[in-house]
Image: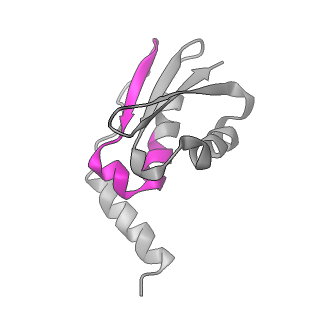
């Protein structure tokens, strides 16, 4: 039987093999690709890297979060996480579902 602790260990192992979503602060609008195979394996990784992408976007710009289609529409898991992490410092809009099944959410950093 797998426990929550096992899940965390798996995520920790997965994280060690995953490159950071960005290594710099973006003073422009940009896109963060969160639809790689390792993103399909972990919704928590998608949320953590989405938050990192927003943190690395300067005020007055936006980041397009392209999330893996396996997790469904981002309103079911990402929007509440963004609200909790950033409050009124960000706003977002759903842009579209990609042909590959992923979803694009544009996050504006105030």
From this viewpoint, is residue 57 visible? Answer: no
User: What quarter of the picture does the C terminus occupy?
Assistant: top right
Q: Residue at x 62, y 27 (%)?
A: 92
Q: Residue at x 35, y 57 (%)?
A: 41
Query: Which quadrant of the structure image shows residue 86?
Result: top right
User: What quarter of the picture does the N terminus occupy?
Assistant: bottom left
Q: Which residues are magenta?
A: 25-49
100 shown above or below 15: above
Q: Is residue 89 magenta?
A: no
The image position of residue 97, as x and y in percent, is 45, 33
From this viewpoint, is residue 105 visible? Answer: yes
The image position of residue 40, as x and y in percent, is 36, 52
Q: Observer-nearest residue: 46 or 101?
A: 101
Q: Residue reaching furthest left?
A: 17
Q: Residue reaching furthest front?
A: 99
Q: Observer-nearest residue: 35 or 58?
A: 35
The image position of residue 74, as x and y in percent, is 54, 42
Q: Residue at x 69, y 43 (%)?
A: 84
16 shown above or below 95: below
Q: Is residue 97 left or right of residue 19?
A: right
62 shown above or below 13: above
């Amino acid at each position: 039987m797998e426990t929550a602790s096992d899940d965390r260990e798996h995520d920790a192992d997965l994280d060690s093999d995953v490159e950071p979503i960005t290594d710099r602060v973006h003073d422009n609008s940009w896109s963060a690709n969160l639809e790689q195979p390792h993103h399909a394996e972990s919704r928590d990784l998608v949320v953590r890297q989405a938050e990192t992408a927003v943190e690395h976007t300067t005020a007055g710009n936006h980041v397009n979060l392209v999330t893996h289609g396996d997790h469904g529409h981002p309103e079911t898991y990402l929007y509440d996480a963004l609200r909790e992490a950033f409050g009124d410092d960000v706003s977002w809009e759903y842009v579209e579902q990609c042909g590959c099944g992923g979803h694009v959410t544009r996050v504006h950093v105030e």
